[in-house]
Every structure is written in C-alpha cells, then in structure tokens.
Image (cartoon, rainbow, N blue to C red):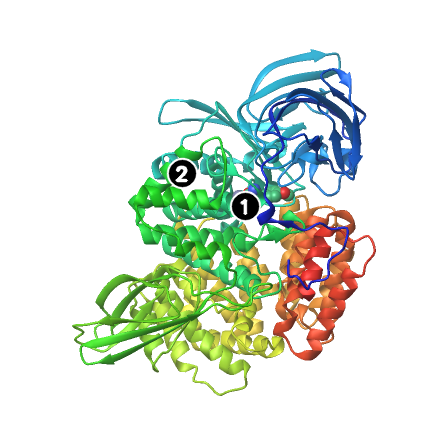
Amino acid sequence: MNAEAPQNPTHTEFRRQDYRPPDWLVPAIALDFDLGIETTRVKATLTVERNGGHDRPLRLDGDEIQPLAVRVDGQDADWSMDGDTLVVAVAGDRARVETEVAIYPASNSKLMGLYASNGMLCTQCEAEGFRRITFFPDRPDVLSRYAVRMTGDKAAFPILLTNGNPLRTGEDGARHWAEWEDPFPKPSYLFALVAGDLKPNHDSFTTRSGRKVDLNIWVREADLPRTGHAMAALKQSMAWDEETYGREYDLDLFNIVAVSDFNMGAMENKGLNVFNTAYVLADPDTATDTDFDNIARVVAHEYFHNWSGNRVTCRDWFQLSLKEGFTVFRDQGFSADTGSPAVKRIDDVRTLRAIQFPEDSGPLAHSVRPDSYVEISNFYTATVYNKGAELIRMMRTILGPDKFRAGTDLYFDRHDGEAATCDDFVKALEDASGVDLTHLKLWYSQAGTPKVTASLDQDGGTAVLKLAQTVPPTPGHPVKQPMPIPLKVALIGERSGAEIAPERLVILDAADDTVEFDGLDEPALLSINRGFSAPVDLQVDRRAGELEKLAASDSDPFARYEAIQELMMRWLIAAAQGEVADIEPVIRAVGDTLRSNQLDAALKAEAILPPSEAVIGDRMDRVDPDAIHGARERLRAAIGARLSDELSSAQREGGAPGSDLSSRAKGTRRLRSIALDFLAAADAQAGARLAKVQFDAADNMTDRSGALRVLASLDMPERVAALEAFYRRHADDPLVIDKWFGVQAMAQRPDALDQVRELIRHERFTFANPNRLRSVAGVFGMNQWALHHASGEGYRFLTDLILEADKVNPQVAARMVPPLGRWKRFDDQRQALMREQLERIVATPGLSKDVHEQASKSLG
Ligand code: 0A1
Ligand code: ZN
C-alpha cells in the first residue's frame, strides 16, 4: 500500500517480506458435512504437526463462524478466540484437533465459503473462503489430504460431489450420504463441495498413458443441451496439455459444475471445477461467438491449473501470478493453437491495453508480484493475470520454445506437490536453459508500463534504430530502473513491401540503445514490437505515409493491425484536440484492408475497428470524453459514408449459419456487425433499417446482439422494437437477459444515464447475482462518455451502486471502484467530482475492507 493512503486502522496490511513458514502443518483433515440450505453443520478433524522448534499455540483462521466444540485428542480443549482466529493450546508435537461449527449458506450473500445458489449448495474457497466453512490454517502453503463425508436430503441434493474420488455411499430414510477422498495433498483454497439436483453431460478421455478419465459437466436438466461446447473444449484442453507441456491428468474423475451465482469466471478446485454458468452454457441461439471462445478459454484455463496451480501451488498469495500468469499464458497458447493465432494475439493485446495499462498507470498500480495487500481478493487483477502472462511470454521469447519447455518440465518435476514461488519458477527455467534471467525478474517487482520511443535513421544502405525507455513512477515507487525489453524488429522495404531485414530479437536493457542494420537497398520502414513481443507503450517516430505503407505490407499480422490502428489513433487524437488532420490516409487504409485478398474476415474486422474511447483517452494528456466521443463518431461516420459499398457487401455477404463455428464463419460474422456499425454511423435511418433486418433474420446470437448493439445507440423506432423483441424472446434465459442489460448500459446516447437508471429499477435487476450486477454497473463503468458526463451524475450513480452492492457482496462491489480512480487523467472539475464520490465511499460507515482498500488507494 501507498504509505500515504488513508488506512482504516482495523484493516491489517500484509507484506510479502513478512512471510514465515506455518507454525503448524495439517497433513490430513476429515470433514463431515450435515448439509442444509439454511443451516449446515461442519465437523472437522485435523491431524496437526508442529513445524519446527517453537512453543506457539495452534492458530486456526475463521471468518463469521463460532466454534460449537473444540477437542484435542478427544478431550475438551483449552481454546480462546483472537478476533476471528481460534487459538488452541496443544501440548505435544502432534495432535488430533476436532472442531464443530454451524454455517448458514442461504444467508451467505458474499458467495465465499459454502453458499446457496438456485436451490443447490456450492463452495468458493479461493482465496480465503475455506475459513468461512471451518477453522483451519487457511493459507496455500499448508497442504493436506482430505477425506470428506457429506450427508443431506436425497430429494433436495440427489447429487453430492467433492474433490477426488467417491469411496462409499449409503442411504438413511429421506437422507443419503457419500464419502470421498482426494489422494493429492492440497491447500484449503482448492477444496470444493457441491450438493444439488444436477444432471451430467457425461463423456470420457483416455490419457496418453492409458488412464480412462470420466468427465462430467453438471448442470440443471434443462441446460444439458447447452453443454456440448464446454465438453469438447475440455477434451481438447486435455489433449493439448499432453502435447504442448507433457502434462497428463491424474485422477479417474473430472467434474465441472455450473452455478448461476458466482463471483468470478470459474474455479480450479481439484477434480471439481466450479464454473459461472456464463462460461459453460452455449448454443448458437443464445451465445455469441465471443461467448463460445470464452468458454473454451476458461475451460482450458481451469483445466490447466491442475498442474500450474494444483500440483504445484503458491507458497503465499503474493505469488499469485506464479499460477495465474502462467496459466493465462497457457490458455492463450491453447486458444491460439485451436483458432487464429493472429486474431488471438490482437484480442489479448486489446484486453491488456483496455484494462491492464490503465491499472498500471493509476493509483491501484501494483507489480505482478505485489509487495502488500489489505484484501487479497482485490489482487485478482489484470496485472497479476495478464501482465503476468506477458512476462511468461517474454521468458519464452528469450529462451526459445525448446528451452522454455525444458524449463517448465523441470519446474513441474522439481516442485510437484509443493507450494512454490515466482523465483522458483524462474530458477527452473534458468537451470534447464543455462540462460541467466536475473534482469528479467524486474518485471515481477517493478510496476508501471515502460514507455519506449523508437526512431529509424537511414543513410544509404545503413539504418540506425534508436531506442529509449522510461518507466513511470507508481504508488510507493517513485524511481525505476530500466527494464529488459525484448523487441522483435524487422525492416520492410518502402518500395518492395518485402522484408529487407528479417525479424530479429533486440533486447533493450538500458535507458537507451542503438541497433544498426546494413546492406539495405531501399528506404526502410520500421516494423517493431512485432507480435507485441513486450508489453510496453511504444511511440515510434514516423515519416508521413509510413503507417499507411505498413498497414498494407507489414509481414507480421499483428504489426499490420497496429499500423492501421495507429493511423486511426493519430487522426482521432488530432480531431479530439480540435486540430485539422487529413482523413484520406485512414480511409485508404481501411478501404484497402476491406478489399484485400490476403486478409481473412476476422483480421479485417480487428484491423478496422477504431480504438475504443477509453484507449484514445489513454493517449491524451487530459482525457476530454466529449471531444473523444465526437471525434470517434466522425471517424466512424466518414468511414461508413466513404466505404459504404465495401461495408455493405461485407454486411450483406456476412451471413453464415449460426451452427458454423469455424474461424472463417466467426470472422465473417464479426466483420458483418462492425460493418453495420460504420454504416449506421454514416446514416442512422438506413443503418437502423439494415440493423433491424439483420436482427430479425438472425439465426444466431452473434448477429442478433451485434445488430441490437448498433440499434441501442440510435434514436430510431427500430431500437425500442428490437429491445422488446429480444427481451421477450429470451426472457427465460438469465445469461441472455444479462446481455440485454449490458447492451443498454454500454449504449452511446446522450440520455445514457437515464436509461441505466431505469435498468436498475427493472424487475429483473438484482444486486445479489454478480453477472446481473456486472451487466449494468460493470459495463456502465466502462462507458466512458456516459460515466464522465460533465454534470458528475455518472460518478454519483456509480457510487450509489457500489455502496448498495457492498452491503451484499463486497468482492464484486470492490471491482466496480477502479473507473473512479482515474480522476487524475481528467479536467479539474471532473477530478473534484470524482474525488468527492471516492471520499463519500471511504466515509461510509460499515464499509467492507474490500471497497475501503480500493477507494482509499484510489484517492491516493
Ligand atoms: N483461480 C480462479 C479465479 C478465482 C479467484 C477467486 C475466486 O473467488 C471468488 C474465484 C475464482 C481462476 O484463475 O480461474
Ligand atoms: Zn486462474
């Protein structure tokens, strides 16, 4: 934490430097659940062992639970409470400690620990939810073998699941029970239990060493037809991890359960992944192509955690990126290999720029391996996940694929069954490759996105590339060292459009450097940070016409995308600042892209989609939301008017049957709705008609919601008609109703705030379901033009939502705070209005520590 940030005295700050091994180990735990929606009783029997020579008592974490009984080796124990912690006196070095608690799943609105969702019971224990179920040393470096007995009503809970393998079941009148055992020692955050009326999509997978694994995806019966895509993705992930990382599954059973109330995307509990329904259920009528891709990505991510996270876990939560950065990197590889690598890379970089870069340049900036936290849930961030993945990618770029694989093999082998650190990971890579990665480790400890400048000076056959970097200050870290920045660089011939200097890897590891290229026989264009080889903010000195040529000829698809985006960006910034800029090069580049025979539809779509208003703002000294909105509207209108033939044919020809989920069909559909959006910007009336036709004719959610998104921002009768029709058609499907809310919360309209206020009053809105809450509040927080309305009403509204949400679910409420923390980037008036709301949050009595940490740091 920033030393100056106001801190609530009751909120402890945890520091990475303070790590100490646990005083007591728990090699085994037996849990006995007497399950009920209203009340569940939990008996726990812990085998505890003193760790090292000390005489400290056993301290067991608890959260909102009270002990009903505590016994040590069968005798009533000498115990006391220190806040939420149960302190038990243990005389010897080893003991059997029994506790008993009652917990109340139906009133658990935080959705951490054991909670009720749609009549079923399920758990979420990462990061510190297990202590809401039973008293335990709830930290990831305490690994235990779990034996679990579950007893419950047969009718309410016909299915009883937990980690590992089932051993025995039995019946007792209206009740039944099941006993399970997990052979792999695991930290408490990986514990899971599910009880409910669920039906499985059953399948199997045979691993390469011949183990037959039963696979089940458990859902409500009515949802079974929508589980096929997730199952296919699971089997693909299992095969991919064997092939790519040599990792095989290790139990005979792999269960996935879908729940509708879930704080995040999904959770990798050992052998029993619990998923947000949004990342399981899909068919073409209700899920977009993006939804399908996200399902495959998240299924893969959670599956990959079985090795990167479960078999090798984290020593402490400061090492979170050890499992998350690496696992995101692994799921990115999976998506690239099973789809279009170029489109995947563009998508990942878009996410990084939209979410991680702003985080890294604002008051909540922290390093990939943070130094401190108040509430660990606030550190499941784009920095830990996505910048963490970029860091792993840089290691692979530097080592090359073979040495990297040797390194990950050694890592898994060396640390199997252990709780490891980020340093352990790097050490394994170094030992296997013989390459020193010491300097690269700065990326773990230094926050902030490095700013890199590049220019190319050519004199005849020789060109000199000049590079320089600065790393901006971040809270608590005013001075930074230069980072090692791996930049893939090539030169493209201005006349020939060919690579005249083949791609090479330049590592900028000082404040500045120069690189020479010889033997050039024509003027060179600089193609740099190809494939986005380093997560930096790169500004290149460009001659007039250079970007346009690169947009047409760069041999790296990512760099080509960048060139078009940069061309648009430069026009947009100029326009937003009231300068006159020539739009012709932009029109030509977009037109050439649309007409190109080399590029597929998916790449065309990515390339021509103008940068978002937020990303444009990030490039300006002061964000002017109205000017940015106006400039982007003008650009879209100009492209729509000038390229109406090309766009109309992309929109018309874009139809592909909804059941076709090939990359080609998905790309065509994406281009189709982007084309529609341009056309509507140029001519609202014609655009609305066209959108309504697309909407009515759609046999798939991608086309339908693409059209609805365009209509939602227009003031045309078709808008209301389509919103109503959409709602009626999908009224029974909560995931689609989320889209209906989200489309309206994102609409670009002068009356956006009134519309969103109405959404909150809608009968289907609730603070209790995280997906629904995010579909309004989370989405509105990203609607720059509406949120930053000069009146400050957007800030006030978001703040009201945060405070209301905090009473129900602090973790989700805290994730709504960051947009308010960007105040420094705005004019004085908006700054004052934003700070006023942050201060209102911090001053609220009874505020959670989740929201308090985010809001107080945001004022920082
Ligand atoms: N480990 C999960 C993310 C996750 C973290 C916390 C949660 O608690 C509400 C849930 C999920 C992942 O990376 O997928
Ligand atoms: Zn993860």
Image-quadrant location for residue 746: bottom right
In the displayed structure, does residue 794 sit left or right of residue 475? right
Choose between 363 and 272: the one closer to the eye.
Answer: 363
Residue 320 circle label: 1
Crowd band around label 1 with a 10 angstrom C-alpha radius: few (<14), some (14–19), many (20+): many
- Is residue 741 in view? no
Choose between 84 and 154: the one closer to the eye.
Answer: 84
- Is residue 215 in view? yes
The answer to whether 233 is drawn above or below residue 457 in the figure is: above
Residue that numbered label 2 is attached to? 411
Q: Is the residue marked 1 within 8 Å of ligand 1, measured from its CB?
A: no
Measured in 3D between alpha carbons, the distance from the residue under mark 2 to the one under mark 1, in whole angstroms, is: 16 Å
Residue under the point 41% across and 65% down: 607
Q: Position of residue 337 (x, y in %)?
A: 37, 46
Position of the N terminus by quadrant: bottom right
Whichever of labels 2 and 1 marks the residue nearer the N terminus, that label is 1
Kind of residue at disc 2: Tyr
In the displayed structure, does residue 479 sit left or right of residue 343? right
Q: Position of residue 380 (x, y in %)?
A: 59, 49
Q: Position of residue 554 (x, y in %)?
A: 30, 67
Kind of residue at disc 1: Leu
Q: Is the residue marked 2 within 8 Å of ligand 2, measured from its CB?
A: no
